[in-house]
Image: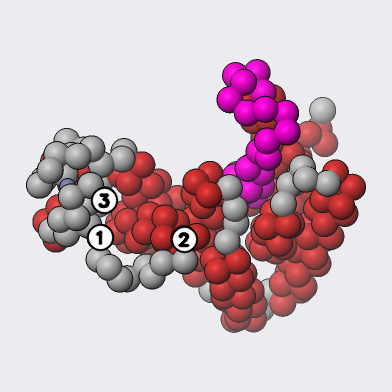
Amino acid sequence: MTALLAGVAGLFGLVFGSFLNVVAYRVPLGRSVVNPPSACPACGAPVRPRDNIPVISWFVLRGKCRDCAAPISSRYPIVEALTGVLLAATVFVVDINWVLPAYLWFTAVTLVLILTDLDHKRIPNRILYPGTIVGVLLLGSGAALDSQLSQFGRAALGGLFYFAGLFLLALIARGGFGFGDVKLAFLLGLFMAFQGWKHLVVGIFLAFFIGGLLSIALLVSRRRGRKDAIPFGPSLVLGAWIGITYGLPIADWYLGI
Ligand SMILES: [Zn+2]
């Protein structure tokens, strides 16, 4: 049953992924996600329904517009495939229960925020605020239906803890990361701590570990100067995803050595 639902979530994710591409590209620019419909940025030809099949169409068209042969970024099929894989993985990690919709929502929102942070170097409030509010409502009502209200209390505490921690760090470090990252930390802390305190601690540790490695890699490759802000959002999200999925075995392994 879980595998079947994961398959459905994966197929849905492929289609939903093309919508996430549009959200990540348009919302930070303050544009509508429905109007105008998708068109080739080079020649303006609208995308035909048969050319709008996730992942497959890009390969059929060999990554080029059917009308003007302008290249279409490989990022579109990559995000579509990634959304499918991540939503299917979410079903396997969380399993079938009332908080599953909350976690599917969490996966989609955090994936979009990775994309906007990489593209526009910001975490837009227009995505983060509704993402957080709907996330709290879905997780809270799911927890109530699953009789997991004490876990939800722990989740809220975890969110506040991560938020306060990054807030203090942002004040001390001045410019290391933005206030968008601080606000994002509440959402991440909420969903990690719902699973357990160990998941939260592992997720926070990994976020800083991955962020540190990325900073060093970027400095060494000289793609970024020392003063340029490094988008920290993707590291925070990656840490949270791993913390939610593998927090328990990682914590137990670390405590065992
Ligand atoms: Zn074109």
Q: CA distance from mark 1 to mark 2?
A: 15 Å
> Looking at the figure, which quarter contains the N terminus?
bottom left
Residue 130 versus residue 49 in the image, above or below: below
Relative horizontal placement of residue 154, taking residue 27 as reference (left or right):
right
Q: Is residue 227 magenta?
A: yes
Q: Earlier in the sequence, mark 2 or mark 3?
A: 2
Residue at image mark 3: 41
| Rendered location of residue 116, percent (x, y) | 51, 52
> Does label 1 or label 2 sit earlier along the sequence?
2
Disc 1 on helix, strand or loop? Answer: loop
Around disc 2, counting alpha carbons within 10 Å, would you say few (fewer than 14), some (14 to 19), or many (20 or more)?
few
Residue identified by numbered label 1:
38
Q: Are marks 1 and 2 in contact (CB under 8 Å)?
A: no
Mark 1 crowdedness (10 Å alpha carbons): few <14, some 14-19, many ≥20: some
Name the residue: 82% across, 28% down.
257
- Which residues make up the magenta segment? 219-243
**What's the residue type where badge 2 is placed?**
Leu
As helix, strand or loop, the secondary structure at mark 2 comes to: helix
Eye-nearest disc, 3 or 1: 3
Where, by quadrant of the figure, is residue 182 drawn? bottom right
Name the amino acid type tagged 3: Pro
**In the image, is residue 179 part of the stretch drawn in magenta?**
no
Residue 100 showing in the rendered view: no
Q: What residue is pinned by disc 2?
A: 29
